[in-house]
Image: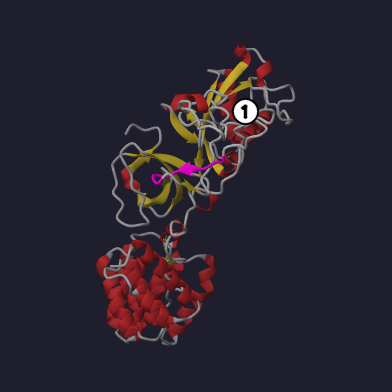
Amino acid sequence: MPSRGDLVRDWHRGVQAVARGDWGCALRLFSGDPEPPARMCFNVGCVHLLAGDPEAALRALDQAVTKDAYMAVGFFQRGVANFQLERFQEALTDFRLALAQLRGNTAIDYTQLGLRFKLKAWEVLFNVGAAQCRLGLWAEATRSLEEALSKGPEGAGDDLHTALGQLQKQVPLQPRQVPRGEVFRPHRRHLEHLEPVDFLGKAKVVSSAIPDDEHEDSQPQQPQVRGADAEGRPGAAPRARDSGPCRTASPCGPRMPPEAETERPRVEQVGRQVPPGLPVAGEPDSRPSEDPLGAGGAAMEEPASLVTVTAQCAFTLALRVPRGVDLAGLRGLLSQALGRQAQRAQLSYQDPSNKGRWVPLPGEEALQRAWRDAAAGTGVLQLQCRPQGAGGRAALYQVVAQHSYCARGPEDLALQRGDVVDVLCEVDQAWLEGHCGGHVGIFPKCFVVPAGQDV
């Protein structure tokens, strides 16, 4: 039984084989799963169509729509296979089934599921007309193309008018299909999980265990980690601090307790600690740096004139910011304290007037309003840096899970009741794509309510 990692790796290699036109290699790689999902069966059917074997394609696409009865694009491609086999009545049935799965929508975008294709209602209606004209139903075919013309975009009008002219001359039409070489691809995050991760990293000396002016005849203790066999493991990270000097002539004494060795963060914090050495507004720094406030930072202000800004990111820190600071100064403090995380993440703020919901800040104007309200009101601004979705996309809005949702496939996003989800894309009228807890996926729209409503 192949592992999940092997299956994902073969899936990716199969997609690469399709791109270079190696149909045999692609079929071998796509067929490695003893229980293939609907999308893999769809891929096998598409490759058989490319290889000129519609009979084998029909069998694979039968499996795809059996495993997923709502796969509109599966019925669409099965109709193409039946059309090539001159089974025009079966092709007409499949195209009508594909149209029914669109459920009144003008299109279904499969990009979020790994297929770079948008199934459009007018294209399905075009294929319905193509099958009808092969059955001698010329009037019905004309009505189907006229309906497609009413649903199609402006760019498709020329093709549809040309097709209507062919029908008037009783010239058969050829069906449209998924573009050549397009198949379902594994999600990028699944491929990233296949890459090896170096958890130890490279060791480097942070500080010497012995001052330079003491014990000139002795060598500093070498950084290493002892294993169960009492032998040092090379490459292990050294300790940042030691309890004191250790002479090579005598064994080391008992070590200090961990709380005596760890340097405390220099800012007020909640949750994870701020790494030592991070530049923080409101405290003196021995290193030369620019002051984004132009007046020595918040440490020179009176407490009554300060606003507390808490920012939750990989760690949580608190900044003391003067009330009179403009937006550029606030941005400078956030960039200085959070570094690149402040630029790569979606900022949200906790709105006290909206039951404490986290509200995304899509631009500078929204951040300026939140800062102005905090400076003029409570004197507290709580920010949150949420990782952006795939491709660095910003959240459109936030929703709250009203019901728990169990993921049914690798593309789904599992939800627990009460989870706050950043919506990244509206897939169609029934499905959304979102980000929650470090995961990105799709979920049913009926399981959530807009943020701010009672769950």
Image label count: 1
State left or right for residue 290 relative to residue 371.
Answer: right
Residue appearing at x 45%, y 46% in the figure = 231
Find residue 219 and report its image quarter. Answer: top right
Q: Position of residue 325 (x, y in %)?
A: 67, 24
Answer above or below: position of 104 versus 287: below
- Residue 367, given in percent of the width and then of the height, sits at 58, 32
Judge by depth and name the residue closer to the eye, 154 or 247: 247
Quarter of the image where one finds residue 247: top right
Examine the rendering and report whether any part of residue 300 can be seen: yes
- The foreground one among 1 and 222 is 222
Estimate the x, y position of residue 397 in percent, counting from the top left.
46, 41
- Is residue 128 visible in the rendered image? The answer is no
Residue 22 horizontal side relative to residue 323, left or right: left
The structure residue drawn at horizontal position 50% and vertical position 37%, both measured from the top left corner, is 314
The rendered magenta stretch, by its main secondary structure, is classed as loop
Quarter of the image with the N terminus is bottom left
Q: Residue at x 35, y 67 (%)?
A: 39
Residue lying furthest front in this view? 249
> Magenta segment: does it hold 432?
no
Q: Say left or right for 455 vs 168.
A: left
Residue bearing mark 1? 280
Which SS class for mark 1?
A: loop
Q: Residues within 10 Å of mark 1 (few under 14, many from 20)?
A: many
Looking at the picture, how far across and down is residue 220, in whole percent? 60, 37
Q: Is residue 432 above or below residue 113?
A: above
Q: Amino acid at mark 1?
A: Val
- Looking at the rendering, the stretch of residues picked out in magenta corresponds to 222-229
> How did the renderer colour the structure?
secondary structure
Residues 369 and 232: in front is 232
Assign the C terminus to one quadrant of the image: top left
